[in-house]
Amino acid sequence: MKNFAYVRATSVQEAVTRSIDDNEARFIAGGTNLLDRIKGYLENPSQVIDISRLQMQPIEPLPEGGLRIGALATNTAVADYPYVRRHYPLLSRAILSGASQQIRNVATVGGNLLQRTRCAYFYDPAFPCNKRQPGSGCSAITGINRTHAILGASDRCVAVHPSDMCVALAALDAVVEVEGWQGTRQIPFHDFHRLPGNTPERDTNLEAGELITAVILPALPAAKSGVYLKLRDRTSYTFALVSVAAAVELAENRIRDVRIALGGVAHKPWRALEAEQFLREKPVDVALFQQAANIALQAAKPLQHNSFKVEMAKRAIEKALVTSVRKGSKP
């Protein structure tokens, strides 16, 4: 590990100011992903700015409905928060399906959003990786790519975003609140993470020095019947092969609103907007759910070892929609 400066910020503004002219500075709170990267020589920060003692832990229902979650709220605090369990159960379920309890106790909401999209080749310096060293090549495209992307990939990177929480936040139309040198701005969750394109080294659309301060969840009637389904190689402590966050709002057995987001299939949490549009205002029908799943995966381009993900994702979408409808139909 190379030497770096360590500073403890006493305010959001101080944290932003310290990082704004230093591209090599990194914020740290829980540190569950950043420390791994530093120890593996994948990150060589000039300074680490400790933001863990800033007052960004509160989780607060909003007067107009919805919820504001402080960026330093731990994953455990969010998953166990009564309002989240009652109004956004898919978010609670997604968080509890990720990592271990020990990690969830220290990992923060802001850190979860900023964990790197990566694969095993990213961690191994013996192999080229465009995310680790831009322009060096992507070893996964012709390598072992069983767990990699089937949607939205490029010839520069086929890694998938690892977060479960972020899949749920994508389905819930969350908004990311950030503080930067120009003040506060809000980023719709759909625009927060990036597809790889020609710059896979960039995971988000954050600008230099910007600090996540909160995530805002809108009031969303469909969310109460939301479900999170995670398919993986073992039952704990591993990333999803495919995951689905789905929520359906019914009105007289017709679909008033529906949300579908996928994990484990793309460089960012993947929202199935065309499939949602297809289902709105239609009657509840499993055959229509199957058509929607086909629409959601029609652009899929599987690699040599992961074509199974296409059918897996279709069936997961269908099951998640059926389960959500059952939940929404209960009195």
Image (cartoon, rainbow, N blue to C red):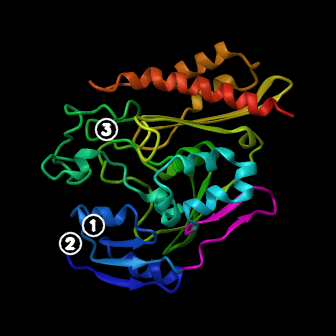
Task: Describe residue 176's horizontal placement relative to residue 302 as left or right.
Answer: right
Q: Position of residue 109 (x, y in %)?
A: 54, 61
Which amino acid, mark 1?
Ile
Q: Residue placed at 79% from the left, 23% from the top?
A: 254
Q: Quadrant of the C terminus?
A: top right
Q: What crowding class fits label 1: few (fewer than 14 Cα within 10 Å), some (14-19), or many (20 or more)?
A: some
Q: What crowding class fits label 2: few (fewer than 14 Cα within 10 Å), some (14-19), or many (20 or more)?
A: few
Q: Position of residue 155 (x, y in %)?
A: 26, 35
Is there any visible trace of residue 218 in the rendered image?
no
Q: Are marks 1 and 2 in contact (CB under 8 Å)?
A: yes
Residue labelled with disc 2: 1
* In this view, the mark in front (1 or 3): 1
Along the viewing direction, whichever of 157 and 71 lies nearer the viewer: 71
Q: Position of residue 106 (x, y in %)?
A: 49, 66
Q: Residue placed at 75% from the left, 28% from the top?
A: 326
Along the viewing direction, whichever of 104 and 190 lies nearer the viewer: 104
* In this view, the mark in front (3 or 2): 2
Residue labelled with disc 1: 38
Q: Write down the region rendered in magenta.
A: 54-72
**Helix, strand or loop at mark 3:** loop
Q: Are marks 3 and 2 in contact (CB under 8 Å)?
A: no
Which amino acid, mark 2?
Met
Q: Earlier in the sequence, mark 1 or mark 2?
A: 2
Q: Is residue 215 above or below residue 255?
A: below
